Image (tube, rainbow, N blue to C red):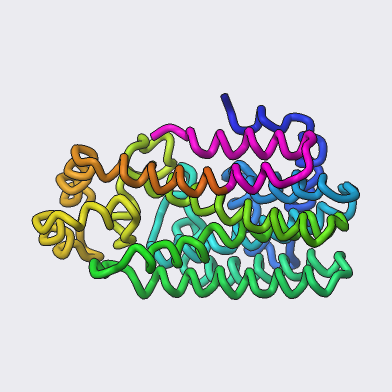
Amino acid sequence: MKFKTLYTFLKNDLDLIEQELEKTVMSDYSMLSDAGLHLLQAGGKRIRPVFVLLSAMFGTYDIQRIKHVAVSLEMIHMASLVHDDVIDDADLRRGKPTIKAKWDNRIAMYTGDYLLACSLEAMTKIENPLAHRLLSKTIVDVCLGEIEQIKDKYHVDQSLRTYLKRIKRKTAILIAASCQLGAIAAGAPEQIHRKLYWYGYFVGMSFQITDDILDFTATEEELGKPVGSDLLQGNITLPVLFALEDPMFRIELEKISSDTTFEEINPLIERILQSDVIEKSIKVSDQYLQKAFSILEELPSGRSRSTLYSVTKYIGKRKF
């Protein structure tokens, strides 16, 4: 089953958001517009806008209002991708050249900054101080996550707590904000939008852990980038953390640097795949999913809750 089949009833609204995204990235400077459109046209599931719309259904659903929140959250996500590609020196994103590869690092950084500014501008359409405070805090956390990712590169002496804190800021906090801000913009009660925040947080943690697993278990075609890219870029993910319990693996991992090639890390990838670290990582992901399911049980029943249930189930069963 494809992800989009879970929410076909949102197609018209998501098409509208796509049009708004294209309008938003347009600039008087053609290079900024071209770079923004290049990233948009590379595709993506638009998971954050989907969470915004589904969460808004717990309040008074008005797409002309909610679309601004969806655009704002997707812009933050897009900006983080552009910055990540610079940090990781990545040439491919979803199987296409990254902005930094197609242009250069400077253009990529300016584009990321521009997208963050566009996010703030889109949210000005929502006249709710709480929404603006939450968005600002979200942007701060995402930026801190980017800084932590740089700081932790090639650093093998990391704890599980450090990893979880990093992916919270890198991924989970933005999905949590998508859920909460969608509900707030729709006027949902406080007890509802707070529960949606925690639902989004738990789903986001599972989503990132799953991505980190897929970096080893999926194919290059499925990933849109080479297998083991995170490992090569020095990002210590959950499967690697578990693998570090083997002293021999640690010795080999300590040899990896920015000069290491994919051929040189292939033996490490094979050792990960032949061990039990993937299964251990899946168990951690599943623990977060179960917490997300528990939160859903506390929300009012209806089409939105049942769709969120299906989305959560899909995230938990992405191909390993």
Quick one: which residue is furthest to the top in this view? 1
Residue 305, above or below 23: above
Region in magenta:
292-320
Give the image location of residue 50, x and y in percent.
70, 44
> Does residue 274 belong to the magenta stretch?
no
Q: Taking 137 as reference, is 146 left or right?
A: left
Give the image location of residue 116, x and y in percent.
65, 68
Q: For the point 62% across and 71% down, which residue is it?
A: 139
Q: For the point 67% across and 55% down, which residue is it?
A: 74
Q: Taking 58 as reference, is 84 left or right?
A: left
Q: For the point 67% across and 58% down, which residue is it?
A: 197
Q: Taking 15 as reference, is 222 left or right?
A: left
Q: Quadrant of residue 273?
A: top left
Residue 111, above or below 237: below
Give the image location of residue 172, x and y in percent.
55, 58
Residue 164, above or below 144: above
| Front-lying residue, 242 or 320 | 242
